[in-house]
Image (spheres, rainbow, N blue to C red):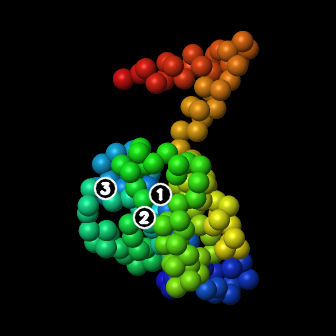
């Protein structure tokens, strides 16, 4: 990667910087739990790949998100966050119009090349964001637990998967 914010293609030509939106209800700061550390690391990985990152994140600890801005990474508070999600289950099934307006405004100011929605509940936002004409990716976390929990208990493999899951979840 070169010193300027951008990338070098295989032919040696410098391309313009790519912009990506990372959106999650997770409040990454302070980075004192697994999901928070994961969010910080995903954002850092996107930056290390040459993307300029707009990070819409939860902020239920009420930290100064701008204090964590750095070259190529800008943090903003997402229009909805985890504490409110517990009372607003509709977010799992219907697009959130405040969030969509927030993303569209950011996209109009600096167009995104892709959007990464982190955590499964954000899936309801995919269809309306796809209308922007850019790739929308959904990252999930601990999805394997949900999948093995849906396995038929009548099969040997299903029984083994469930027992393994129960053992892992019960471990200290």
Secondary-structure class at tag 2 = loop
**Residue at horizontal 27 percent and vertical 56 percent from the top:** 61
- Provide the residue designation for mark 1: 24
Percent position (x, y) of residue 146?
A: 59, 32
Mark found first going from the N terminus, 3 or 2: 3
The number of numbered badges drawn on the structure is 3
Secondary-structure class at tag 1 = loop
**Mark identifier at residue 60:** 3
Residue mark closest to the camera, 2 vs 1: 2
Q: Are marks 2 and 1 in contact (CB under 8 Å)?
A: yes
- Provide the residue designation for mark 2: 78
Give the CA separation, mark 3 to mark 2. Answer: 10 Å
Residue 71 in the figure: left or right of residue 8: left
**Residue at horizontal 38 percent and vertical 66 percent from the top:** 77
**Residue at horizontal 53 percent and vertical 39 percent from the top:** 142
Category of crowding for the residue at label 3, using alpha-carbon neighbours closer than 10 angstroms: few (below 14), some (14–19), many (at least 20): some
């Amino acid at each position: 990667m070169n010193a300027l914010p951008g990338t070098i293609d295989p032919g040696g030509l410098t391309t313009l910087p790519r912009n990506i939106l990372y959106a999650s209800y997770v409040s990454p700061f302070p980075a004192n739990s697994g999901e928070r550390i994961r969010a910080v690391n995903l954002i850092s990985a996107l930056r290390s790949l040459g993307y300029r990152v707009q990070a819409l994140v939860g902020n239920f600890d009420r930290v100064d998100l701008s204090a964590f801005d750095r070259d190529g990474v800008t943090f903003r508070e997402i229009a909805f966050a985890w504490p409110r999600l517990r009372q607003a289950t509709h977010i799992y099934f219907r697009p959130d119009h405040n969030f969509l307006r927030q993303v569209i405004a950011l996209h109009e100011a600096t167009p995104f090349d892709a959007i990464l929605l982190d955590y499964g509940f954000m899936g309801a936002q995919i269809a309306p964001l796809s209308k922007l004409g850019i790739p929308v990716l959904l990252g999930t976390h601990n999805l394997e637990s949900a999948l093995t929990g849906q396995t038929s208990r009548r099969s040997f493999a299903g029984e083994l998967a469930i027992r393994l899951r129960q053992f892992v979840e019960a471990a200290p």
